[in-house]
Image (cartoon, rainbow, N blue to C red):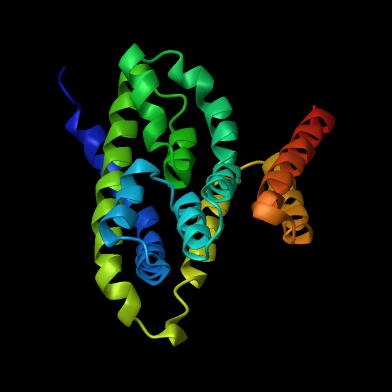
Amino acid sequence: MSLDRSIVRQGIVDALPLFVPAVPFAFVIGLVIVESGISPFVGWSSSWIIFGGAAQLTLISLLGSGAAVAAAITAGLVVNARHLMYSAALAPVFQQQPHWMRWFGPYLLIDQQFALSMLRADDDPKTFRTYYLSSGLLFWALWLITSALGLVVGPVVPEAWNLEFAVSILFLGLIVLGIDRYPKLIAALVGAGVTYLTAGLPNRAGLLVGAFVGILAGTIAERLRE
């Protein structure tokens, strides 16, 4: 299968700026792995087994604090529940893809990848596939490299740098990138507000509640607009 190199380059060029805020996040992951007492190799392996920074951070943090394995896994699944919504949004696009792509593609579906993919959802199947794999595999490779560096760099970075703040910047940038219509703005604002109000729920269930209510609000806004 021949590849359109211009599409490959575009996928790489678009992905690189979105990965930059994830670098401090990777250092935070490395610091948490070191402080958790988990084997560094096992902790780093979660980078490619889970390939989802927020769920990975949740899982390792809870295991390091002595939580039960089942509880840690459940919390990680709750944090990653938003990927069900990502999958639903991209399902029509993936239905046009080969069988192997429908199986492998979701593995690369992280937040940044979803934001870029929705902007290319109207591409023809081959172009979308080339772009998706180019950006997704770059995210995957860079995450493995930076999370490995985080094992060394994370513990020596001064606390005053407040690396955790980069996580918020990362998600804020993705939200701004994806808001191009009024209903999406409503969904983002309502979802953020509800998530804040339910932040005290166990196992970070507030994330799921906020996402659900935000989607519901966006859907209602879309219906009223029609």
- Residue 127: percent from the left, percent from the top? 31, 24
**On the image, which quarter does residue 100 sit in?**
top left
| The C terminus - image quarter | top right
- Left or right side of 57 for 185: right
Residue drawn 27% across and 52% down? 144
- Left or right side of 216 for 204: left
Residue drawn 49% across and 71% down? 164
Between 199 and 76, the residue placed more toward the observer is 76
Residue drawn 72% across and 60% down? 199
Between 51 and 67, the residue placed more toward the observer is 67
**On the image, which quarter does residue 8 sit in?**
top left
Residue drawn 34% across and 50% down? 47
Between 89 and 204, the residue placed more toward the observer is 204
**On the image, which quarter does residue 128 sit in?**
top left
Q: Which residue is farthest right?
A: 224
Using the rendered image of the protein, determine whether residue 176 is visible from the camera's viewpoint. yes
Is 121 situated above or below 143? above
Between 108 and 183, the residue placed more toward the observer is 108
| The N terminus - image quarter | top left
- Residue 134: percent from the left, percent from the top? 27, 37
Q: Which residue is farthest left?
A: 2
Using the rendered image of the protein, determine whether residue 98 is visible from the camera's viewpoint. no
